[in-house]
Image: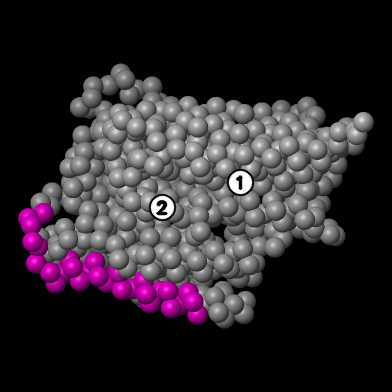
């Protein structure tokens, strides 16, 4: 069909993915060769270098924006943003995991390899503009996270969480795929630009609505939006704590990137009520259920459902306002949630023994540093000023208000108020309640210090000087929204050729 | 004799899809749940190939990718199931109950 071979620029545009794959494979190959005691430092260090190399190669990739591999991959400000975001999350995860893996006595090898492979999928999700590639990268990222969720192999809860995640996840992927097949049938293409051109020219076939709904089921599962959220609390409770911090942010951010592309760039039909309902349900169910939790991981799982709801509010808004709000929110949420889970995984200790709210009593006295950092993350999750969470919520709700979504905004604000209760509850327990049983707090190792400092800095940075970030997300959102007009026509021209030869 | 149109394929695919969903929701054994998911994926393949009659080869290529992915998913799924079985000695979905649903 297309006799030309990929050129050098094509490879530059997927350079981060190539680099991360190479590091991932190197870790897998080295794993059986190195001594078990050394493997932790060596392979973890290699993973860390891998993510740093990934960041550098993202910078190189950003220098040559454009399409690659016959319009399968698009490099623009939007994909660069999500590349940097997910790689940074993984970097913090690796820093957190160092100590965690040693305390839990887990073998390190595949763990760091799987993180990097999952990262490849998530990076590719953010730059893919072709449903086939989106599906493949979604699966790369999901399959890695299924395994990571069950990494505490000897623990019954961990393998149970992995099994649940896998069964429901592949069920949801099957729905997504069915939707993709329908979309292909309705528009005759799997390229998002061509789909957008087909949907915007004249009557939208009924099939496209069905396709959109089915695809939303699949992606709604990945971002843990109600009513596809049932798996979230169970999986988050059982999975290793650092992994939960990772999978509640990075795959979610990537799935939101895909949703942005599908919903805004392709101007999906019939999306409004779908998203409206899902946003309201996620916010309300997440916040109300979180009120009664006494396991901190489970509480944060429900909170993550609620936050997915807030992000969906922005999806219901006008594209030019909603898209930057979504991007800002995913970044702010990533910083605070990964940080919070870093603290949780440090306190969890051997076999994740100390993860209930009761265990956090008296933490303000026994470890002021940990209690202080966790407090800042929780304040940010509530959305109090000088933290990233405040501006994230502010932009989302102002985008919704400017799009005349008054009821959605009211429901959102009420929900933020409900949410404040259970976050404050943790803070109150930490500072005002006496510990009933002695909870040992291990000394904080250097890597974890670095992880906490990074997330804390990001949270405060986004809360104090959000301007630079905001202009960046606005610019890249604009690129995303303009892309449809410039490239759609040339896409249709290309797509017409093979069709004529049939 | 009615000629077989694209619509016929779509109806068969939709039937397979529904059977798969019912299987996932009602079966107790995890292995059968996995098979039901495969059934849905095959419904997708049938759809893609049927739509290929209208729109060109894209759909058939996509179907090959779906088959590959189904294999990867089955491998990982059975691995996870074995890890689970070692801990709990069961393959029934309703006994996956340590974490409250």
Q: On screen, A362 above or below A401?
A: above
Q: Residues within 10 Å of mark 2 (few under 14, many from 20)?
A: many
From the image, tell me which residue sits under label 2: A232
Left or right? Give the position of A65 relative to A495.
Answer: left
Give how far across and how far down residue A422 sits, in percent. Answer: 30, 69
Badges 2 and 1, same chain: yes
Confirm whether the magenta stretch covers residue A432.
Answer: yes
Residue A130 in view here: no
**The C terminus of chain A, quarter of image:** top right
Q: Return the x and y of residue A1 as percentages of the image width and height.
A: 80, 29
Q: Going 7% across and 55% down the picture, which residue do you hit? A: A438
Residue drawn at 78 percent across, 32 percent down: B57
Q: What is the basis of the colouring in this image? A: one colour
Q: Secondary structure at mark 2?
A: helix
Provide the chain ID for the residue under circle 1.
A
Asked whether B53 falls inside the magenta stretch, the response is: no
Magenta residues span A410-439
Q: Residue at x 25, y 70 (%)?
A: A425
Residue A106: image location, x then y, percent? 25, 33
Overall secondary structure of the magenta section: helix
For residue A27, which quarter of the picture? top left
Corner quadrant of residue A209: bottom right
Q: Is residue A106 left or right of residue B31?
A: left
First in sequence: mark 2 vs mark 1: 1
| Cα separation between marks 2 and 1 | 18 Å
List the single residue furthest toward the top.
Answer: A33
Circle 1 packing at 10 Å, graded few (<14), some (14-19), many (20+), is many
Q: Residue at x 33, y 51 (%)?
A: B100
Q: Chain of mark 2?
A: A
User: Where does label 1 land, which residue?
Assistant: A176
Query: A41 and A300: which one is in front?
Result: A300
């Amino acid at each position: 069909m297309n006799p030309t071979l990929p050129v050098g620029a094509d490879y530059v545009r997927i350079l981060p993915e190539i680099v991360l794959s190479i590091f991932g494979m190197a870790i897998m190959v080295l794993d059986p060769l190195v001594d078990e005691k050394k493997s932790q430092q060596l392979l973890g260090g290699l993973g860390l270098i891998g993510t740093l190399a990934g960041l550098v190669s993202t910078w190189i990739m950003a220098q040559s924006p454009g399409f690659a591999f016959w319009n399968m991959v698009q490099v623009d400000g939007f994909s660069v943003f999500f590349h940097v975001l997910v790689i940074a999350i993984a970097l913090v995860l690796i820093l957190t995991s160092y100590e965690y893996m040693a305390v839990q006595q887990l073998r390190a090898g595949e763990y760091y390899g799987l993180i990097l492979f999952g990262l490849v999928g998530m990076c590719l999700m953010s730059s893919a503009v072709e449903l086939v590639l989106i599906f493949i990268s979604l699966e790369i990222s999901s399959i890695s996270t299924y395994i990571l969720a069950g990494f505490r192999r000897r623990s019954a809860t961990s393998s149970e969480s992995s099994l649940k995640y896998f069964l429901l996840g592949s069920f949801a992927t099957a729905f997504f795929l069915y939707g993709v097949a329908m979309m292909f049938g309705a528009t005759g293409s799997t390229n998002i630009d061509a789909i957008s051109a087909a949907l915007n020219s004249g009557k939208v076939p009924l099939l496209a609505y069905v396709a959109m709904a089915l695809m939303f089921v699949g992606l709604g599962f990945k971002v843990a939006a109600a009513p596809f959220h049932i798996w979230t609390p169970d999986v988050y409770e059982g999975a290793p704590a650092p992994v939960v911090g990772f999978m509640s942010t990075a795959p979610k951010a990537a799935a939101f990137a895909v949703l942005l592309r599908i919903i805004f760039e392709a101007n999906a039909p019939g999306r409004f009520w779908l998203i409206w309902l899902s946003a309201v349900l996620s916010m309300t169910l997440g916040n109300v259920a979180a009120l009664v939790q006494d396991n901190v991981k489970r509480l944060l799982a429900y909170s993550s459902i609620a936050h997915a709801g807030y992000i969906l509010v922005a999806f219901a808004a006008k594209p030019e306002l909603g898209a930057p709000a979504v991007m800002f929110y995913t970044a702010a949420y990533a910083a605070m949630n990964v940080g919070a889970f870093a603290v949780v995984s440090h306190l969890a200790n051997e076999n994740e023994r100390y993860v209930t709210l009761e265990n956090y009593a008296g933490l303000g006295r026994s470890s002021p540093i940990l209690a202080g950092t966790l407090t800042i993350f929780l304040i940010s999750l509530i959305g109090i000023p000088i933290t990233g969470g405040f501006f994230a919520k502010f932009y989302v709700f102002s985008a919704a208000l400017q799009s005349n979504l008054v009821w959605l905004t009211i429901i959102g604000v009420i929900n933020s108020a409900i949410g404040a209760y259970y976050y404050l509850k943790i803070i109150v327990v930490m500072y005002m309640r006496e510990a009933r049983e002695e909870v040992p707090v291990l000394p904080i190792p250097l890597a974890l210090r670095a992880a906490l400092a990074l997330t804390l800095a990001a949270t405060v940075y986004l809360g104090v000087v959000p301007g630079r970030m905001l202009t960046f997300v606005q610019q890249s959102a604009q690129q995303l929204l303009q892309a449809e007009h410039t490239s759609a026509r040339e896409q249709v021209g290309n797509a017409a050729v093979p069709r004529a030869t049939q | 004799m009615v000629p077989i149109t694209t619509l016929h394929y779509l109806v068969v695919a939709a039937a397979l899809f529904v059977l798969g969903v019912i299987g996932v929701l009602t079966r107790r054994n995890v292995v059968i749940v996995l098979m039901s998911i495969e059934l849905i994926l095959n419904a997708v393949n049938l759809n893609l190939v049927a739509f290929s009659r209208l729109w060109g080869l894209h759909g058939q290529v996509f179907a090959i990718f779906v088959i590959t992915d189904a294999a990867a998913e089955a491998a990982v799924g059975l691995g996870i199931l074995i890890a689970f079985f070692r801990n709990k000695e069961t393959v029934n979905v309703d006994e996956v109950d340590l974490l409250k649903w």
